[in-house]
Image: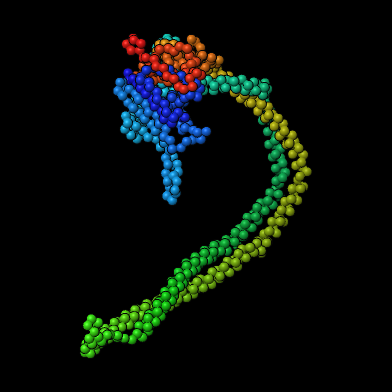
Amino acid sequence: MKEIKLLSLSLKNFKGIKKFDLPADGENLNIFGDNGSGKTTIADSFYWLLFGKDSLDKEKFGIKTLDDGKVIHRLDHEVEGGFTVNGEPLTLKRIYKEDWVKKRGQLTEEQSGHTTDYFINGVPKSATDYNKKISELIDKKVFKLLTSPTFFNEETKMEERRETLLEVVGDITDDDVISSNQALKDLPAILRGEKIEDMKAIIASKRSRIKKEVEGIQPRVDELYMSLPDSTIDVPSIEKEISAVEKKLDENVGQINNIKNGSAITSKQNGLRQVEMDLEAIKRNLESESVEKGYQIQAKIQEEQSNISILTRKKEDTEHQIKRNNEEVTVLERHIAGLREQWTTENAIEFTHESECACPTCGQDIPQAQVVAAKEKALSAFNLNKSKKLESINALGKSKSEEKTELLGRVEKLSTTANAIQSQIDDKAKVVSKLEEELATLRTAVKDARQDPKYQSKLQEQAKLNDEIKSLKDNASESVASVEIEVASLRAERAELNVKIAQHDAAIATKKRIAELQEQEVKLAKEFEEVEKGIYLIDLFTRSKVSLLGERINEKFKIARFKLFHVQQNGGIQDVCEVTYGGVPFSEGLNNGAKINSGLDIINTLTEHFGVRVPIFFDNAESVTELIDTESQLITLEVSKKDKQLRIEKQAVEKDGAA
């Protein structure tokens, strides 16, 4: 068992407390003070020293000291704690301070933020090393569970409370639960390897689907019964009647066709069909040659236009090269002109020689022969240098002139090429124009094909035959009219008989569908029974598991008891995790003393489980008259109106049965 005890706690400029020292010496303490005297601040400083948060697990809270509601700047806010860990001393210290900097060009400093300094046994540490040391002592979550009587019940989510309890007692396997109750022997076959919760969701979904399907079957059956047509029809007799009616219809239709299609009419109709075929042949012969030729001309036009586009791009490229060469010629001409000016200027420079005839050191005259020799030497050097410069300018000018001549030659060749390309473009354009004229003429000829004498002659012959056929039919219409009246009556009679047959078929199909639905309803009812059995067994499993878990968990605690499941009105089981004390749930009127003592009972059990004992801070302790025993160091914070300043009382921790 790792045991952590608080020996001392020192505060400086922390939440309004300028300086305060708490001499704990590893013993139980009672701290008394009026409201606002700083009791909760003591607990906040303890948590902040370890984890950088207050007793409510908030990271951002008012650490700084205020004066008339305003922050007092440039103060260091400091908490230092002395501990023993299994008897070994440990000192931790955390300092929160403002960071002031003077920016370039400014006379005064500005606050740029905050920094936190960390110390372990007086040695400065990084935040990483400091937090690592704390985590080595105890996990932050475990610490909160072991140091606050209210944290487990009031600040921990239900799911986390359940996980913690199951971690303490060890979860019960599904096989353990099934083997504990003979009634659950069929459950594995239902689960088919799935988890209880997963199968519960699957079965619930299946149950809902089956129920919905069953509820929808009867209304559909009733609807089908309501729409069921008369099925007492003598189908064979009706089929005989239909056969007799169709025989009469065939006879009447044949009679009408004979009247309408007399020999004269048949002959004329055959002649009309031949004329129509002749018209189509004439039109096809006249148009096919022109259309085919038009396609050929159109292809040539497209080919020549493509060639014109290619030649145009070549000409544009050539003209671009001419432009670039002309620009280079212009640059060379300016350069050559500059060289001429440079040559003229250089050639105009004349030799000048200024030499003193007396020695600058002693003042005596220099011999005339030496003066003449020096002048001749200087003239020779001048002439040689001038000659070289003029020769260099001439050489460069000659080179530039040659470049210009070469460029002008290129321009001339490119211009000749451009003109040749333009000539090709013009020739192609003429070809395209001529082809377009041919195509237009050909299209006009195609439009005029119907004006061909042969075609017109056949059109007149077609009109004449149509008139003759119409005249023959008009004379036969009176004979046909009486027969058509009887045909219409027979068709109506046949339609009525077919409706009766259709009603009979519909009745058979409807009865078949009703039987299918009723069979489906029986099948669904069996499935529903199986689903209900599965739901019952899963609920029974859950109740059995509740009982086993409850026994194991409650064995670990002296006064606290736990409600892990809630039976809903529909019989379902809902996961919960609520502490009870004397049968009263935590959330339903449990008094404060019972809440605190149950919290201490939970701390005692969790302390044994996690193997670490830490100081317990209990705020508002005045509301509890008697606390259960705990082996952890206990620091209570009690309201006392008479104590305007914090007052500390020590309670010796029992050791080996002695007080």
Residue 573 rendering spot, x and y as whole percentages: 50, 16
Residue 307 visible in the snapshot: no
Observer-nearest of 596 and 210:
596
Q: Residue at x 68, y 61 (%)?
A: 457
Residue 201 rendering spot, x and y as whole percentages: 49, 22
Observer-nearest of 386 and 273:
386
Which quadrant would residue 391 be assigned to in this image?
bottom left
Residue 166 rendering spot, x and y as whole percentages: 41, 18
Quadrant (top left, top right, bottom left, bottom right) of the N terminus? top left
Q: Residue at x 33, y 34 (%)?
A: 124
Color style of the picture: rainbow
Residue 284 rendering spot, x and y as whole percentages: 59, 59
Q: Residue at x 45, y 41 (%)?
A: 111
Give the left or right position of residue 319, taking residue 385 as reference. right
Which quadrant would residue 241 be assigned to in this image?
top right
Observer-nearest of 394 and 441:
394
Give the left or right position of residue 118, taking residue 563 as reference. left
Position above or below: 333 against 219: below
Residue 118 visible in the snapshot: yes
Which quadrant would residue 248 be assigned to in this image?
top right
Q: How many marks?
A: 0
Observer-nearest of 251 and 122:
122
Q: Residue furthest bottom?
A: 368
Quadrant (top left, top right, bottom left, bottom right) of the C terminus? top left
Q: Residue at x 65, y 52 (%)?
A: 273
